[in-house]
Image (cartoon, grey):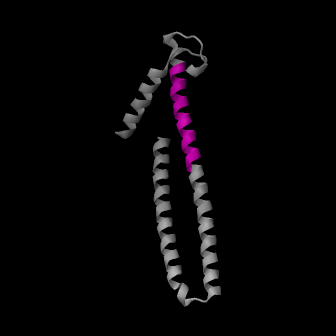
Amino acid sequence: MALAKLDREAQEFAAENLRIQNELTAEERELTDRRAELSPEEFRDLANAFDARVQKLRAEQDEKGRLIRRATEEARLSFFRDIIADIARARGAFVVLDHRYVVLSADAVDITDEAIRRINQMATEEAE
């Protein structure tokens, strides 16, 4: 299922972020340790290069995170829409409304319990 793939990608992204953070921390520590042996100009140049690298990596990782979050949200919405559309077709419905916008309805047209049951069933099947 697309959601499981996206969840794996999100976990890999989190691991990548941790790895990058650890690498940058070590690099910063090394630069700080070398400060005494460098001239002020050399240190400033190295520090500026390090800062530029950090900013570039942060921007790249932020963009990756945004793309993963957007893809995950779209997949979740598609998943729920598909379930609701299947239930609506099976019941011969022409429209599905949020209960907050309905003034009066018959219990027979409420698909909430069935939708929840199907979502839970698919989640259980996915976990197995």
Q: Tell me which residue sits at (58%, 55%) in the image.
A: 64
Instruction: Tell me residue 115's x, y (percent).
Output: 47, 24
Between residue 85 and residue 100, name the one nearer to us: 100
Q: Is residue 29 magenta?
A: no
The image shows residue 124, relative to residue 111, as above or below, that is below
The image shows residue 17, relative to residue 84, as above or below, that is below
Horizontal side of residue 110 vs 125, given as left or right: right
> Main SS of the magenta segment?
helix
Instruction: Tell me residue 29's x, y (percent).
Output: 49, 77
Q: Tell me which residue sits at (51%, 18%) in the image.
A: 90
Instruction: Tell me residue 122's x, y (percent).
Output: 42, 32
Q: Is residue 73 magenta?
A: yes
Horizontal side of residue 45 vs 113, given as left or right: right
The image shows residue 86, relative to residue 13, as above or below, that is above
Q: Tell me which residue sits at (60%, 83%) in the image.
A: 43
Quadrant in which the C terminus appears: top left
Boundaries of the magenta span: 68-88
